[in-house]
Image (cartoon, grey):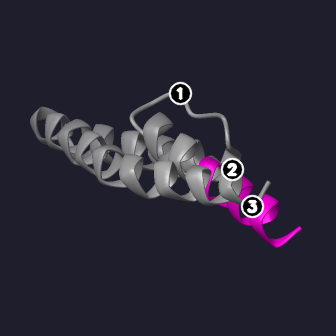
Amino acid sequence: MKWIGLLLIAIGFVLLPFGILQFKKAWKEYDSFSPKSKKIFGMMEIVDVLTGTPILSTWLMYISALCIVTGLVIFIV
């Protein structure tokens, strides 16, 4: 059972850089917006990360974190 936990942790760490790259790509798209719109989209990204309902560019980072946390729980228990 511990190997499943290790596998999930490994998958999570493999997905994490792709999630970060996706987030950076989405953030660059906001450069063409006005400063007020940038603030709104920035707040939306923060809420997206904190609520756990990935709807914007953070969905891949959310899956990565979910795999890492679930893998740690399985490995420890």
Of 65 and 14, the residue lying toward us: 14
Q: Quadrant of the N terminus?
A: bottom right
Please state which amino acid type lies under the numbered disc 1: Ile
Dominant secondary structure of the residues highlighted in magenta in the image: helix
Which structural element holds mark 3?
helix
Disc 1: CA contacts within 10 A as few (<14), some (14-19) or many (>=20) = few
Q: Residue at x 48, y 48 (%)?
A: 11
Task: Determine the residue located farthest toward the bottom in the rendered image.
Answer: 76
Please state which amino acid type lies under the numbered disc 2: Ile
The residue tagged 3 is 2
The location of residue 20, given as percent across then percent down, is: 31, 52
Q: Are marks 3 and 2 in contact (CB under 8 Å)?
A: yes
Q: Quadrant of the C terminus?
A: bottom right
What mark, if any, has residue 55 been given in the picture? 1
The residue tagged 2 is 4
| Quadrant hosting residue 13 | bottom left
